[in-house]
Amino acid sequence: MEGTHDDSTIFNLNIENELRFTVGEQTVSLELLMGFAEIFGAEMVTSTVYTFPPFSSIAVFSWQGCKLKLKGKTEAAYVVSDTLQMIHVHLHACLEERRIKAEAEDVKGPISLVVGPTDVGKSTFCRILLNYAARLGRKPIFIDLDVGQNVLSIPGNICILPMNKPADIIDGYDQQGLSVYHFGYKSPGYNIMLYFLLLKKLGHSMNLRLRNANKAIRSSGVIIDTCGWVRGHGYNSITLAAMAFEIDTLFVLEEERLYTQLKRDMPSCVNVVYVPKIGAVNERSRLLRSKIRDGRVWEYFYGSQTPLQPHSFQVKFSDIDIFKVATPYVNFADDITEISEMTLRPVQIGIDLVDQVLGLSSADRVDEDLMITNIIGFICIIAVDMDLQTVTVLSPQPSPLPKRILLMGNIRLS
């Protein structure tokens, strides 16, 4: 650290050093003044000011040394020389070697599943691997199975994104080509049978998608993020995802007990790799995690650093069909992999739907498989008029709604 003036601090990073800082309740900005640096695998641009939102945990790594200006109040800011970057680069190199082999043989590239308890850096680790791959011109597919802390959509959904370029340091992933699939709940535990069934269906769909993809996409492989539930049915969801997506690499972050269990239970064709916890990641309280989840829903409609102006308009009861997806009861003593059915339960419109967030399905008919039919957006019911038989909705797009089938879970705007 060179010195402090006003609310800015200058940091001089030596070769292979890392600046770590945690943002509090106010935004913090960072500027690369000189040299080369990267944030979670994405290269910084000199003289560009990056503004980080509240509660962010950031790590800035430099291979050759650099000079940085950090402006704003942080909860912590410090430089470390003992980082995990060499481990991450080594693991990336191992995946890249397999991509080269897959490309030469015109087969699927590495299919990697990333698991571990909460707040160990699973999403950050995925981002690093994806960014390094994209910087080499690869086109990996990113799948986010974390329905609670999803980085691609609002909570309650599973997302699939083909990567065409590294994620933006501030704005995140380019969402062109993003597919969103409705689960409807903030945790798999709210409807574990539905979650299991969704994993099975999406795994089958993804395997077909890879077989029909071009060589560049097929050989680039897949990286799959998961939630932090690793006990009981959470562990079952890990093993089911491994089977459904036909993975060949399993990265286990932080927890040796989980690593040992998976090493024992995975077939020999799956390479189970232990990865230490990401150093820049801080443990969040349950209250903060809930606040971040609710914030993601709010930002969808109203924006974050760039405010949005959502549209509000009335929709007739007769112009929409609202459903809940349900699964039959299954005895857990039976084989959970045999779950194959689901039902649609019509939802009666009433004042209890106020503040309810609904997923707008791209399906035209209810006899389509809605679980693997893309969600094209979300609306929120903000008023119900039983006399006029209309609901008032909040929507990113103006009236009318492009489709009529809406899916409901327990996600609300608060």
Image (cartoon, rainbow, N blue to C red):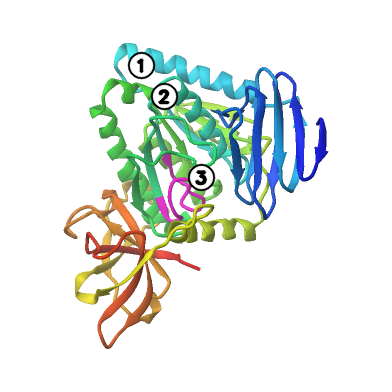
Q: Is 368 placed above or below 271 here?
A: below
Quick one: SS at disc 1?
A: helix
Q: CA distance from mark 3 to mark 1?
A: 30 Å
Which residue sits at x=27%, y=57%? 361
| Amino acid type for the residue under numbered disc 3 | Tyr
Which residue sits at x=57%, y=56%? 292
Quick one: SS at disc 3?
A: helix
**In the current view of this chain or complex, which residue is farthest to the bottom?**
387
Highlighted magenta segment, given as a residue range: 143-157
| Amino acid type for the residue under numbered disc 2 | Pro
Residue underneath mark 3 = 235
Residues 216 and 144: in front is 216
Q: CA distance from mark 2 to mark 1?
A: 8 Å
Which of pointers 2 and 3 indicates the residue nearer the eye? 2
**N-terminal of the two: label 2 or label 3?**
2
Residue 275 in picture, x, y percent from top left: 61, 30
**N-terminal of the two: label 2 or label 1?**
1
> Quick check: is 146 in the magenta stretch?
yes
| Amino acid type for the residue under numbered disc 1 | Ala
Residue 116 in picture, x, y percent from top left: 57, 40
Location of residue 208 by image quarter: top left
Question: In this view of the protein, can residue 107 be seen by the observer?
Answer: yes
Question: In this view of the protein, can residue 186 be seen by the observer?
Answer: no
Residue underneath mark 2 = 110
Location of residue 395 by image quarter: bottom left
Task: Give the class, few, some or many, for how many residues have Cα within 10 Å of label 3's Cα (few <14, many ≥20).
Answer: some
Q: Is 178 placed above or below 109 here?
A: below
Q: CA distance from mark 2 to mark 3?
A: 22 Å
Say whether residue 279 is left or right of residue 367. right
Q: Is 57 placed above or below 354 here?
A: above
Residue underneath mark 1 = 102
